[in-house]
């Protein structure tokens, strides 16, 4: 009996830029498409590639909502067995979470990867991350949702963040264990992957580019005057406050008055912790002022999660109390 050749998989690739495909230029590393296209060619016997190279390629530190809007439309337009997005590491966690909240229910996996070093770097991580990302699609290890592949782990998008610029383990998710681990040349899927896939929302939200979201990082001062100026500027619809520890800080009466006035006109304030493994629990007297002011105490959210969900809510046309209600809904396990 003749053994049948397995069917070729159709995988769509969106190359946005980032370190993984960079080459040396006169002013430092800059995005290039040559090495990425060469690296993908080694899989051509098994995969029918459909590659979209963004023009222009960008360093991910320069990503804007306009890029996410374009990439979202690209994902929706694909008819394939899986999608691979090659992305820079600086804002990968932002992009992954924005797309996770905005894309709606997916019937194919969307895997995002990148690298700390460019392809071709001796002892670098680019070849390994690219290969394991491709294998996550070929081995059906990636869930039918947005996930990230990095350093031998499939990581849930929501709750992820960049934790290092030097280690190969550049990303982590403090709220969710890895969905799969790379062991002895194959992906070992964990139980959490099925939960992630079933939690994907069914509603698509076309991203808008005019959402006004700002962030204030608290430092030890007698009053958060910079936050007050931001709230009073009229330039933001949502302000993320990165406070200390469990959501604590020193806020003057003038600060609290500014928060209340901002929210009275439809603004929303989200309180997240600066701590890498922080949780805003509002358990201390030092957080009472924020609770009394009606600030949303966002539990274990990262600033990336707060930004992404706020952007999607604003893109859906939500403001004020409606936006606050949406933010408090558990859409993708962000409140677990």
Image: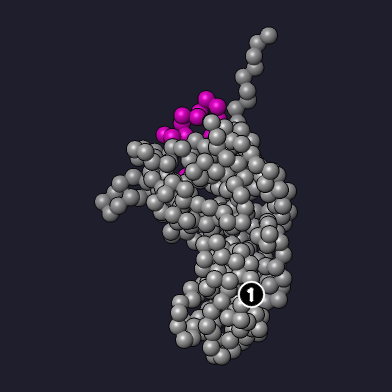
Whole-percent x, y for residue 336 in the image: 68, 59
Q: Is residue 121 left or right of residue 200?
A: left
Q: Give the extent of the magenta segment.
A: 38-55
Q: Is residue 173 above or below residue 79?
A: below
Residue placed farthest to the top in the image?
Answer: 1
Q: Is residue 45 above or below residue 332?
A: above
Whole-percent x, y for residue 145 in the image: 65, 47
| Residue 268 visible to the viewer | no
Image quadrant where residue 307 sits:
bottom right
- What is the number of callouts on the image? 1
Find out whether residue 72 is within the magenta segment.
no
| Residue 120 visible to the viewer | yes
Whole-percent x, y for residue 184 in the image: 53, 31
Badge 1 marks a residue whose secondary structure is: loop
The answer to which of 164 and 144 lies nearer the viewer is 164
**Circle 1 is placed at which residue position?**
282
Whole-percent x, y for residue 100 in the image: 62, 54
The answer to which of 194 and 32 lies nearer the viewer is 194
Q: Is residue 330 left or right of residue 154?
A: right
Image quadrant where residue 191 sits:
top right
Quarter that holds the N terminus: top right
Look at 43% across and 41% down and name the residue there.
126
Look at 52% across and 73% down and name the residue there.
244
Image quadrant where residue 303 sits:
bottom right
Find out whether residue 47 is within the magenta segment.
yes
The answer to which of 242 and 231 lies nearer the viewer is 242
Look at 26% across and 51% down and name the residue there.
26
Q: Is residue 76 left or right of residue 56?
A: right
Q: Is residue 296 above or below residue 50?
A: below
Residue placed farthest to the bottom in the image?
Answer: 253
Q: Is residue 66 left or right of residue 103?
A: left
């Amino acid at each position: 009996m003749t053994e049948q050749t397995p069917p070729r998989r159709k995988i769509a690739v969106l190359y946005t830029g980032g370190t993984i495909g960079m080459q040396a230029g006169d002013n430092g590393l800059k995005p290039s498409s040559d090495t990425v296209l060469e690296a993908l060619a080694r899989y051509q016997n098994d995969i029918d590639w459909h590659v979209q190279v963004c023009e222009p390629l960008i360093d991910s530190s320069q990503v804007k909502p306009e890029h996410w809007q374009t990439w979202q439309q690209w994902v929706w337009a694909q008819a394939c067995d899986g999608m691979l997005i090659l992305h820079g590491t600086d804002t990968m966690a932002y992009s992954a979470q924005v797309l996770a909240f905005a894309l709606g229910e997916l019937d194919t996996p969307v895997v995002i990867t990148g690298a700390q070093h460019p392809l071709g770097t001796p002892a670098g991580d680019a070849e390994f991350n690219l290969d394991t990302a491709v294998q996550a699609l070929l081995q059906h290890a990636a869930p039918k949702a947005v996930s990230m592949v990095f350093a031998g782990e499939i990581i849930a998008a929501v709750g992820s963040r960049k934790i290092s610029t030097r280690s190969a383990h550049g990303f982590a998710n403090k709220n969710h264990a890895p969905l799969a681990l790379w062991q002895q040349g194959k992906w070992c899927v964990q139980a959490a992957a099925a939960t992630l896939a079933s939690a994907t929302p069914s509603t698509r939200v076309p991203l808008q580019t005019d959402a006004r979201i700002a962030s204030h990082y608290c430092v030890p001062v007698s009053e958060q005057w910079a936050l007050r100026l931001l709230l009073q500027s009229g330039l933001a619809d949502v302000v993320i406050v990165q406070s200390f520890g469990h959501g604590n800080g020193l806020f003057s009466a003038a600060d609290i008055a500014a928060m209340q006035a901002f929210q009275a006109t439809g603004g929303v304030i989200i309180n997240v912790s600066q701590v890498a493994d922080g949780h805003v629990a509002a358990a201390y007297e030092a957080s009472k002022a924020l609770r009394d002011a009606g600030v949303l105490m966002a539990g274990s959210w990262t600033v990336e999660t707060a930004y992404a969900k706020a952007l999607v809510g604003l893109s859906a046309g939500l403001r004020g109390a409606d936006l606050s209600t949406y933010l408090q809904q558990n859409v993708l396990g962000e409140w677990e």
